[in-house]
Amino acid sequence: MNRTTPVIPAEDIQRQKEYCAELRSLNAQRPAPPRAYVDTYGCQQNEADSELIRGMLADMGYEITGTDQGADVIVINTCAIREHAEQRVFGNVGALVHGKRKKPDQVICLCGCMAQEAHVADRLRQSYRHVDLVFGPQQLWRFPEFLRRVLLRRGRVFETAPVDGAIAEGLPVYRSGRLKAWVSIMYGCNNFCSYCIVPYTRGRERSREPEIILKELKELAEQGYKDITLLGQNVNSYGKDLEGGWDFPRLLEEAAGIPGDFLLRFMTSHPKDATEKLFDVMARCEKAAPVIHLPFQSGNTRVLTAMNRRYTREQYLEKVAALRARIPDVVLTSDVIVGFPGETTPEFEDTLSLIEAVRFDALFTFIYSPRKGTPAAEMDDPMSKEEKSANFDRLVAAQNRISLEKHQAYIGTVQRCLIDGLGEDPRHGLTARTAGGRLVHLDGDPSLIGRFADIRITDCSTWALFGELDAEPS
Ligand code: 5AD
Ligand code: SF4
C-alpha cells in the first residue's frame, strides 16, 4: 500500500528478533530464568506499548513478574501529560536505587513520553545514575538492541533524540488479559492543542494498515477476547496517511463484521473529527459498544479557541445531539481541564453549564498543568491556585451528582454485561461491565468470568452499579 508515513523495513524488525534470540540463549544458560517487571503510567496507549515491551522481554527469555523486588530488568513506561504524573515517576525511580544497591547487575530502563522531554533526559543523566537505559516512544521497536547494548557493554544508553515516527509491525505482544485487549490503530497526534505535550513526545499521526489491524482483530476474536478497544490519540484521524479511502468509520464497520461474540470500543475521539458517519456506524453495528469518550476540555468558546481545539461550545453540543439522535442511551464520557491560563470564573461557569446540559455518564477532570515547550505554558496565568481548586471542587461535586443520578436510572433495568473479574468485596464476588462500560458488582460463581450475562440492576453508587444475575448466562 502506498502511504505517506514510513514503515520500518521487515529486515530491521528481523534484526531485533535476532537480538532477542541472542539474549534468549544467554539467559537460558542462567540457573533460573531472569525476571522482568514493567510498570506503566498514563494512558491506554502506554498500556498497549507495555504489552509490546513485555512481549519483547518474554522473547528474550525473561519471566514477566508483577513486582520490581529482585527483578533483573525493570522498565518504567512513563507519562508526561501532567506535572503530577512526572513527580510520581521521579519519586518511584529514585526509590529504585536501594534495590539496585542490593542487586548491582539489575538493569533499570525508562521509556514513554517523559523520555522524549529533553529536560527529563538531562535530569536522568545527571541525577539518576542508577538508570541504565532511556528511550522515547518512537524508538520502542529497538528495545532489544538497546537492552543488549546495556547488557553486553555495561554502559548507559540514552536514545532520546527526536526521531520521526514510523510504523513497526511484527513485534511480539504479551497480553495481560484473556478477555480485554488493546489494539493500536494509529500513533501520534497532529492537533497541537495548546496545553498538550503529546504531539511533541509521540510525533506525527500515522496509521497502521487496515489489513494488518483486521487480521489482528480476527485472531483476538478467535482466541476468545470479548472486549477490544481500538486505540489512537485521535482515532478519527485514522487513514489520512493511507491510500484507498480509509477512514475510522470504515475501519470500525469492517471490524464489526468479524465473526465472534465480542464488543468493540475506541478512544480517543477529537470532537472536531467525530462525524455523523461515525455515529451512523456505531448505531448500526451491534458489535460497536454504545459508548464514546469525547473530550470537550472547556465549555467556553474563547477558552476553546485559546486551547486550539477548533470547535465552539455550540458545535460540541450539536455533535452530542447528532449522536443521541442516533443512539439515545449512548454512554458519554469526557475530559475537562479547569484553570487553563486566562480562564476566568465566569468562563469556568460555562464548563459547569455544559456538563449540566450534556449530563455525561463520567468525567475525567484535570487542573491545568503547564508543560514546558507548549504554547499555553507561555500564556499569562493570573488565577490563584486556590481559586482554581475551588472551581475544580464545584465541577467535581456537580459531576458526582450527575453520575449518581445517571446510575440511579439503571435501577430496575436488565443489562447485558461481560462478567470480567473477581470483586474485592466478599458480598459481591464478581465484577462486570455493561456494554457502555459501566462497572457492575454482583454475586456469583467465578466460573462465570468471561461470559456475557443479563444482570438486573438493584442498587448503585456514584462510581458503580450493583446487580444480580437475571437469567442463565449465554
Ligand atoms: N494539563 C491538564 N490536563 C491536561 N490534559 C492534557 N494536557 C494537560 C495539561 N497540560 C488532559 C486533557 C486530555 C487528557 C488526556 O489529559 O483533558 O484530554
Ligand atoms: Fe493532546 Fe489535543 Fe492531541 Fe489529544 S488531540 S493528544 S489533547 S494535542
Image (cartoon, helix red, strand yellow):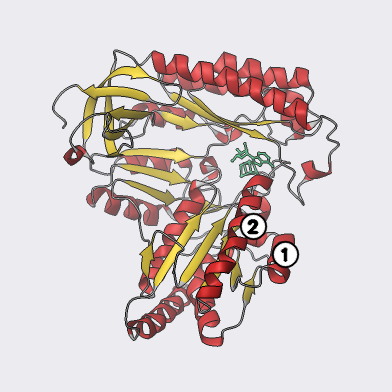
Tally the numbered discs. 2
Q: Is residue 321 visible?
A: no
Q: Position of residue 51 (x, y in %)?
A: 42, 58
Q: Position of residue 249 (x, y in %)?
A: 44, 38
Along the line of sight, the residue nearer the viewer: 50 or 462 = 462
Residue at x 33%, y 28% (from the top left corner): 440
Residue 419 to residue 5: above or below: above
Q: Ligand 1 is found in which quarter of the picture?
A: top right
Taking 217 as reference, is 368 left or right?
right
Q: Are marks 1 and 2 in contact (CB under 8 Å)?
A: yes
Residue 90's tag is: 2
Q: Amino acid at mark 1?
A: Arg
Q: Quadrant of residue 352?
A: top right
Q: Residues within 10 Å of mark 2 (few under 14, many from 20)?
A: some
Along the line of sight, the residue nearer the viewer: 436 or 213 = 436
Residue at x 76%, y 28% (from the top left corner): 386
Q: Amino acid at mark 2?
A: Phe
Residue at x 62%, y 62% (from the top left corner): 94
Secondary structure under the numbered disc 1 in the rendered image: helix
Q: Quarter of the image for the C terminus: give it.
A: top left
Q: Quadrant of residue 160?
A: bottom right
Q: Which residue is mark 1?
A: 123
Secondary structure under the numbered disc 2 in the rendered image: helix
Instruction: Look at the numbered disc 2 and say if its residue's Cβ is closer than 8 Å to ligand 1.
Output: no
Taking 214 as reference, is 377 left or right?
right
Q: Earlier in the sequence, mark 1 or mark 2?
A: 2
Q: Residues within 10 Å of mark 1 (few under 14, many from 20)?
A: few
Residue 438's tag is: none
Residue 364 to residue 192: above or below: above
Taking 421 as reference, is 20 left or right?
right
Residue 20 to residue 383: above or below: below
